[in-house]
Image (tube, coloured by chain):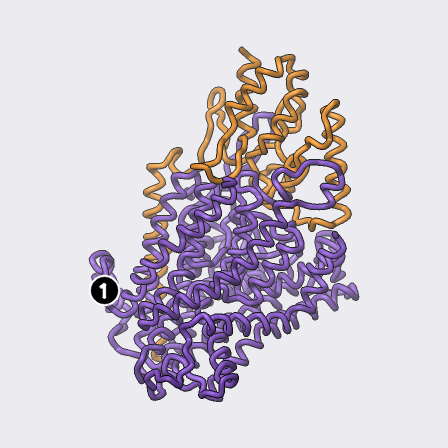
């Protein structure tokens, strides 16, 4: 087999083989069964709860759980805003980086708080080591744990029983940190340290190159950061170039480890759902639907990148490595194309190649991955997004065959459907409205005043585009799609560090994080209270291939109706121009 | 919400200590066992000077194997790609200009043999590698400039070819290591 194709096949299979036992372990952690990590963390957790005056045995309703989640998030927001606005005088700032402007701090704090990690700054110059470790890396842990804990509440609600008390949110949250995220991060950080990723608090080094040029080399505590960046599907890079940077991702092995690390928890959570609620067949149906969607996106992208750029072919040079602009030789076109789709279907948003320079087909598939946002999806929240589509599919399926829509032995009624519809339609609304406004401004070259200025000091809105024509439109569409999907990758050519982009995407980020958590938790909480109806011959079976197909069709119909016009103006038009 | 505020604040402080204090401290401790104590792998040169093995360097001199074009000029105080779209007219002119320059410096080569990684920028702007084909096409020029035999330089390229890892991933060549070896045979 072609060594580059073998590489990605190994990544995928390795992830699946690890995810099933990890899912079983996660189910045990959330249901409070004995696991081997009790020995390491059990006593520590009891001590931490006692200090925090929290009794982890007190169960909460879905509303109480959401209150705790929002309170925690508010505290974290204030802490990180403080760090970023004051980093110039706080410790661990060997390179003397400046404090952030308020609009940039707002965008960065929200972006890390909501597990998105859209970065309008560059790590080398934009943040101190203190901010990296105590603000941003901290949020990478706790935002992932928030998603996991919310998913745990939903798992609990979907058990075959009637209940109002759905476990303790603090307990789910802390155990997500100690039992799931931390052990994985130690393992991954250790591998990285030995592959060549720095873990130091020393600042920029100056060396003379072989040819005699003076060059500066940024370093930092990268290994610890890069581990949680992927395990928590955060994706925010330590350096500006993210995982394309040869320190952040030094070898083909580190590339495999990072790829496995970012898909591992999204896979494992699906299986954890199966083990926890005793619906293993249903979990495999979900995984199957997601995998079919993933493969449909990844295969065309790999082919497009291997074929290379037709314009370069026309110039008469060879493209043995495919479309290599914006890519690293050590990963090659195939591993980069695979990564670009994986990072967008799950909500990581880390990159090992610059997405702006990918071919139009790949760009479109990345956008589709984020638009659908639940072919695996981010840690915890991917499952929650998928759950919304399941509810829609159950309802539509019920109508089609003339049965009362039921899921997990509970009736799905008007109230749940209303919430599901609002959540499903809010995502396209946010990203399309944002893109429409930005495109209008760019097309009219509006004078943006205080809201925007480019490198030349001009205030014209078209100045934020790095590429003309359809590709320029795609840059704006990508930015809002990435924000609304809480993804965080970008067509990085866009000049996004200015009040217009910082503030507008910050608002999109806030809505698109908390509504898709609140909605599914509310639905799950509502159906948990209902009477449990044991399955009978009249029940619409959900753990079948037919139902999987129905879920898939619902996704495709919503995505096609909502997003096709926007895609036609961007990547599809670009592709047609090229061929 | 009110009664959750105090527990939330205390839990946050505890999490900061655990996740941002203890966790990175332990990883830092592990890094002390790694080569160069987690400060990035280095290659020693003459005297006290050293280079970072993974950070690409700019090679523009005809006597060296050229590295890839970089959007940040190989200044590793920053990083990034060109972010040019594949159909951007300015970008295509730039690539054409790089091809023309390369042909001027390497007379007699066939344009069809120029691999695209030599005329396109990497994602990080710090790519330490080039493809095998990109090295081979420069052998003739370097032999001529340095007055060495083509076969000697060919041999050097073969030695520095890094094969796929356990049969996975692309073949590549670390430009810095190759050029250091080139300097060594030249002085001998």
| Residue drawn at (42%, 47%) of the image | A257
Question: Dot 1: within a 10 Å radius of its alpha carbon, few (fewer than 14), some, or many (20 or more) residues?
Answer: few
Q: Which chain is orange?
A: B
| Residue drawn at (42%, 69%) of the image | A75
> What x and y, as percent, mark residue A364?
63, 59
- In the picture shown, does residue A439 fall above or below A396? above
Residue that label 1 marks: A47
Q: Which chain is purple?
A: A
- Inspect this view and state whether residue A418 appears: no
Left-right relation of A319 to A15: right
Q: Nearer the viewer, residue A558 or A164?
A: A558
Query: Which chain is indicated by disc 1?
Result: A
> What x and y, as percent, mark residue B180?
54, 22
| Residue drawn at (69%, 51%) of the image | B85
- Inspect this view and state whether residue A95 appears: yes
Left-right relation of A137 to A566: left
> What x and y, as percent, mark residue A110?
51, 65
Residue at the right extreme of this rendering: A444
| Residue drawn at (37%, 69%) of the image | A281
- In the picture shown, does residue A201 fall above or below B135? below
Left-right relation of B93 to A124: right
């Amino acid at each position: 087999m072609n060594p580059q194709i073998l590489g990605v096949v190994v990544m995928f299979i390795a992830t699946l083989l690890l995810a099933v036992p990890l899912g079983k372990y996660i189910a045990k952690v959330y249901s409070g069964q004995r696991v081997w990590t009790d020995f390491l963390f059990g006593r520590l957790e009891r001590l931490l709860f006692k200090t925090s005056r929290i009794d982890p045995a007190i169960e909460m309703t879905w509303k109480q759980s959401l209150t705790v989640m929002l309170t925690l998030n508010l505290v974290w927001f204030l802490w990180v805003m403080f760090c970023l606005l004051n980093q110039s005088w706080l410790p661990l700032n060997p390179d003397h980086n400046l404090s952030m402007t308020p609009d940039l701090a707002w965008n960065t704090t929200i972006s890390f708080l909501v597990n998105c990690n859209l970065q309008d700054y560059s790590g080398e110059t934009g943040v101190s080591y203190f901010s990296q470790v105590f603000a941003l890396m901290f949020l990478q842990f706790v935002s992932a744990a928030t998603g996991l804990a919310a998913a745990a509440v939903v798992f609990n609600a979907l058990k075959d029983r009637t209940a109002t008390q759905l476990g303790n949110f603090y307990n789910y949250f802390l155990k997500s940190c100690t039992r799931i995220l931390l052990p994985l991060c130690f393992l991954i950080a250790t591998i990285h340290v030995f592959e060549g990723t720095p873990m130091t608090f020393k600042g920029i080094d100056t060396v003379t190159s072989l040819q005699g040029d003076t060059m500066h080399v940024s370093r930092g505590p990268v290994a610890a950061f890069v581990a949680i960046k992927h395990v928590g599907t955060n994706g925010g890079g330590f350096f500006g170039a993210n995982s394309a940077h040869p320190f952040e991702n030094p070898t083909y092995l580190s590339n495999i480890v990072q790829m496995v690390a970012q898909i591992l928890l999204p896979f494992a959570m699906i299986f954890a759902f199966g083990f926890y609620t005793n619906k293993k067949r249903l979990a495999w149906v979900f995984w199957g639907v997601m995998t079919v969607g993933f493969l449909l996106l990844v295969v065309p992208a790999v082919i497009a990148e291997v074929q290379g750029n037709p314009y370069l072919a026309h110039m008469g040079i060879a493209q043995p490595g495919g479309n290599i602009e914006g890519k690293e030789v050590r990963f090659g076109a195939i591993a980069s194309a695979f990564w670009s789709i994986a990072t967008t279907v799950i909500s990581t948003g880390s990159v090992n190649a610059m997405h702006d320079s990918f071919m139009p087909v790949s760009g479109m598939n990345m956008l589709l991955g984020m638009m659908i946002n639940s072919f695996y999806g981010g840690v915890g929240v991917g499952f929650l997004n998928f759950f919304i589509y399941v509810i829609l599919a159950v309802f539509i399926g019920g109508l089609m065959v003339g049965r009362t829509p039921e899921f997990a032995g509970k009736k799905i009624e008007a109230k749940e459907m209303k919430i599901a519809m609002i959540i499903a339609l809010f995502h396209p609304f946010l990203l399309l409205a944002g893109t429409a406004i930005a495109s209008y401004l760019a097309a009219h070259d509006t004078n943006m005043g205080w809201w925007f200025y480019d490198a030349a000091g001009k205030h014209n809105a078209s100045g934020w585009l790095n590429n003309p024509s359809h590709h320029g439109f795609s840059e704006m569409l990508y930015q809002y799609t990435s924000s609304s999907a809480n993804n965080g990758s970008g067509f990085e050519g866009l000049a996004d560090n200015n009040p217009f982009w910082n503030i507008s995407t910050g608002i999109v980020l806030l809505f698109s994080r908390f509504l898709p958590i609140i909605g599914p938790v509310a639905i799950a909480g509502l159906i948990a209270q209902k009477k449990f109806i044991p399955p009978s011959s009249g029940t619409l079976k959900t753990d079948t291939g037919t139902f999987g197909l129905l879920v898939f069709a619902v996704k495709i119909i919503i995505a096609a109706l909502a997003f096709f016009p926007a895609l036609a103006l961007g990547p599809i038009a670009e592709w047609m121009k090229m061929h | 919400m009110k009664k959750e505020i105090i527990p939330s604040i205390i839990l946050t402080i505890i999490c900061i200590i655990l996740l941002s204090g203890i966790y990175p401290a332990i990883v830092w401790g592990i890094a002390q066992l790694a080569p160069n104590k987690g400060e990035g792998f280095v290659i020693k040169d003459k005297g006290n000077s050293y280079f970072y093995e993974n950070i690409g360097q700019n090679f523009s001199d005809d006597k060296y194997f050229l590295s890839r074009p970089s959007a940040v000029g190989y200044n590793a105080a920053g990083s990034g790609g060109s972010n040019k779209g594949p159909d951007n007219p300015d970008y295509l002119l730039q690539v054409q200009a790089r091809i023309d320059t390369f042909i001027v410096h390497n007379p007699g080569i066939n344009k069809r043999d120029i691999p695209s990684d030599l005329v396109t920028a990497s994602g990080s702007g710090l790519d330490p590698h080039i493809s095998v084909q990109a090295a081979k096409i420069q052998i003739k020029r370097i032999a001529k400039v340095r007055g060495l035999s083509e076969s000697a330089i060919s041999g050097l390229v073969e030695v520095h070819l890094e094969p796929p890892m356990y049969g996975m991933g692309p073949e590549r060549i670390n430009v810095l290591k190759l050029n250091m070896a080139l300097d060594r045979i030249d002085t001998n």
